[in-house]
Amino acid sequence: MHLHLPEGLGLPAIVTLAALLLGALPFLRLAIAALAPGWQFAPDAALEQIGSRAAVNATLHTLETAGFSALAALLIGGAVALALGITDMRHKRPLAFFFVFSMMIAPQVAALAFLSLFAPHSPILGALGLSPVPGTPNPLLGRGGIILVMALHHAPLVAITLWTGLRSVPHSLVEAAQMEGAGPATIVARILLPVLRPQIIAAALIAFVAGIGNFGIPALLGLPVNYLTLPTLIYRRLASFGPAGLSDAAALSLLVALVAGCGILASVLATRRAGGKVEIERPLQPFWTLGRARPLVAGALWTLLALKLGLPFLALLCEALTPALGVALSWQSLTLDKFTEVLLRQDVTMRAFRNSFLFAGSAALLLALISIGFAYALERRMGRFRRVVELVIELPYALPGVVLAIACILLFLKPLPLLGVSLYATPFIILFAYLARFLPLALKAPVAAMAQIEAHHEEAAKLDGASLWQMLRFVVAPILAPAATVSGLMVFLVAFNELTVSALLWSSGTETLGVVLFSLKEAGLAGEAAAVAISASLIIFAVMLGLDLCGKRLPRNVLPWRI
């Protein structure tokens, strides 16, 4: 006996089931493992683990680094957003491009670059006469370094959020203030900042949640000095005890989810308090004429980029091009041996490049394909149920990656029912985690494009007798294909250097670039790690540049750096 759903319900049912599978099921399994081990409600063990001294210290460290870095990111990202959004500065596009690029590179790459810049043997500090005494500990190791690097890394998140807020401000507010004789500084202080208060709070909370879930930066800067945050504590427990430590890891992951969930809820409440939608005849235009101050503002922003991106990566490049630590880079000492080693000789690094291309590319392709059907269902067929489904879909992306990783381990550790096959320690568990985590990112552009399509195309197809699936294939898919392609490439950008999820899910043969880079650094092979980091970042840069060149053909506001 077969169950046939009406055609109008088939696609919404499929989307809802997929959302439950990718978004709800892993976290339900995590909650059961933490609170009801053996399928009997017994939260005592989880509460004991959460209240342990190690967990309390890690929680305090997590709140400390995430909180202070979010405040610093708000100041840096807010200043950049205003400078590029409301002034008459020139060359805004390259500034915004490189600012966002600094966030698209992996957190562990950023941490490695700053470690190279401030190392006692740093050629950059040496050239500036600022080299510390040999043997001096790297000043970035520990709390201060984590806060600094996370603040710089998450500042573009703040800027992107505020750029979105600036688009929703009607220019008539500025014009009215100008007619009253208000200057640019007064307009910013008394009109723009109060109007943007919900977005400012949301931006700070987004940076805070990103800091809670960040694994790469605390791993490289905190683990060597035993400064543990919750993600690195979970990693150390699993690395030490393996599957035997899963119950402890589940309880700690629940704690991470709780802390991050409070930040997410506060962010949602902040944006809802923005009030109803305002009809905008003309969005905000740059109104601050800098005059003679324009070179100074531009110079400040380019200096920020040099400190945030240029100098750290130059130090990283020097480390990759010298034969050994402490050797000054010159035409005589310059060598490409480390790049040759990691790209052509070492099996593990070559396999990591292949795996990262395979996992990120497969996830990007699959998500680009299914995003078309999802976008159509969410925009046209879900009705009031849409927001519930969207919340379930967004759960793996909103919560820290370490929580999703532990949930996937628990979900797939035992063989699948009926099939008798286990996905644990196979490439498919990483692919599942990538699909779950990056589905919300893949849906952003297609849903936005679907909202702009008038329904008469679909109505004409129905009058011609086309079925739902025929309409999706021949009418909707061609229209949404450009947006879906962009979404797929954005997924590739984020997934290619991913570490937080894969650090807990990889097994022998499924190493990713993030895992290999972290392993090389732990093994003391800083030059090889630098070569991997530079090579991976160049790939990200090439993909971003390709997307930017195609920007005019893409839906508006899809590429975050095109302001």
Image: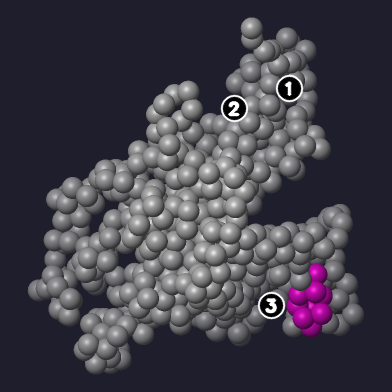
Residue at (14% x, 50% y) in the render: 345
Numbered circle sitting on residue 299: none
Circle on res. 289: 3
Question: Residue 355 occupies which quadrant of the picture?
Answer: top left
The reply, left or right, for residue 10 in relation to residue 234 is: right
Label located before the other in sequence (3 or 2): 3
Quarter of the picture containing the N terminus is: top right
One can see residue 562 in this view: no
Which tag, 3 or 1, sits closer to the chain's start? 1
Tell me how far mark 3 sits from mark 1, CA to CA.
55 Å
State whether the magenta stretch is mostly helix, strand or loop: helix
Q: Position of residue 212 (x, y in %)?
A: 54, 66
Q: Where are the magenta residues, as a range?
A: 186-195
Q: Which of 115 and 29 is in front in this view?
A: 29
| Residue that numbered label 2 is attached to | 478
Which residue lies at the image location 58% right of the left edge and 40% below the top edge? 25
